[in-house]
Amino acid sequence: MKPLAVSMGDPAGIGLELAARVWAERDGDTPPFFFVGDADALERASTRLGLATPALNVVDSADKIAVDGEQLSILSVPLAMEETPGAPDPVNADATIAAIEKGVAAVRAGAASALVTLPIAKAVLHTADFGFPGHTEFLDHLTQDMPWQQARGPVMMLAGPSLKVALATIHTPLALVSKQLTRERIAHVGRIVGEALRRDFGIEAPRIALCGLNPHAGEEGNIGREEIEVIDPAARSLRGEGWQVADARSADALFHDEARKTYDAVIALYHDQGLIPIKTLHFWDAVNVTLGLPIVRTSPDHGTGFDIAGKGVARADSFRAALKLAWEMAQRRARA
């Protein structure tokens, strides 16, 4: 199977350090990968970490990628100027965007089996007329013309060893969440989650839990009617299609040890409802997964870390987990 493509993210953040460290410390469990970004910047990150300068195979097109275990192949995307850790510069925004584009193109061309994206800074990219809220929407745009027979995303999932949480709304102000939740939207997310659990996670008969929006899931309409009018009808619709989805459950009792044994993934209705439990349980090793796309994409579940960039203290746990999960998902799709 082809190696994973790893896009560099913002060069002023911790992404370069993570790639350099994981390559230097690779072992038999590390999936094969190549780096999409600036070779000199990766070498500088290695030096900052006190690591041996990696042997690099720098190429200008994905069809020249060679993975032999000794050399790290670099699909070259030069920076406009040398990075300064912790000080993002808009002049490098175009290179950050180009690395994502080249990573997607490598997967589309069959030179990579999946894409793992290192963190970007959205505010920096917007100075380059990026035009997308974030990675997820950009990847959706870059793959829109690819055939896909199942329910189309993107849906954001955070996956850890004991909990998988998908989001029905992502970066939506809390005051607007109720307005954005419709029966159709929740049912669509449920289909995408169910199909992904089967296809990408190997769960033959997935069980999906659905959070309520209101305290105590509305208490039969006494503390809000969204459960009665929107959420439970969406669950009924999904059950009618054969999915194992229960009616809305009170979110405050859905994430403890015993509750997590009753489902394979949970759909949270707004950002903090899902991210607080996943980051409480798996702060270091959760993975951001994009569901419902014709390519496999994962990412570390953290940001650019500008405050610690260049200090050599960034932990690579989540990046390692993102590599492993992308590799497992790509293997399952290859066998399908």
Image (cartoon, rainbow, N blue to C red):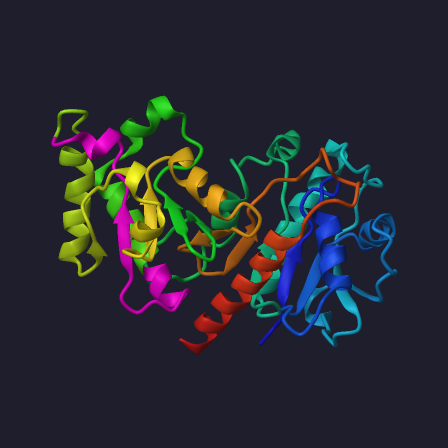
Residue 16 versus residue 154: which sits nearer the camera? 16
Residue at position x 85%, y 52% from top?
Answer: 40
Residue 252 versus residue 234: which sits nearer the camera? 252
User: Residue 257 magenta-drawn?
Assistant: no
Q: State the image quarter where residue 102 is shown.
A: bottom right
Apparent side of residue 218 relative to residue 80 in the rendered image (left or right):
left
Asked if residue 327 is positioned above or below residue 280 in the image, the reply reads: below
Asked if residue 172 is positioned above or below residue 327 in the image, the reply reads: above
**Residue 309 pos. (x, y %):** 75, 39
Please state, as top left, top right, bottom left or bottom right, where the C terminus lies in the image: bottom left
Q: Which residues are magenta?
A: 195-220
**Residue 47 pos. (x, y %):** 87, 52
> Across the whole image, how many numbered discs are drawn on residues?
0
**Residue 122 pos. (x, y %):** 60, 34
User: Residue 212 magenta-drawn?
Assistant: yes
Residue at position x 67%, y 38% from top?
Answer: 305
Please indicate, yes or no, whether residue 226 appears anywhere in the rendered image: no
Residue 178 versus residue 104: which sits nearer the camera? 178
Residue at position x 62%, y 59% from top?
Answer: 320
Residue at position x 28%, y 42% from top?
Answer: 185
Please state, as top left, top right, bottom left or bottom right, where the N terminus lies in the image: bottom right
Apparent side of residue 170 relative to residue 192 in the rendered image (left or right):
right
Q: State the image quarter where residue 207 is shown.
A: bottom left
Please indicate, yes or no, whether residue 73 appears anywhere in the rendered image: yes
**Residue 67 pos. (x, y %):** 72, 74
Apparent side of residue 3 relative to residue 136 in the rendered image (left or right):
right
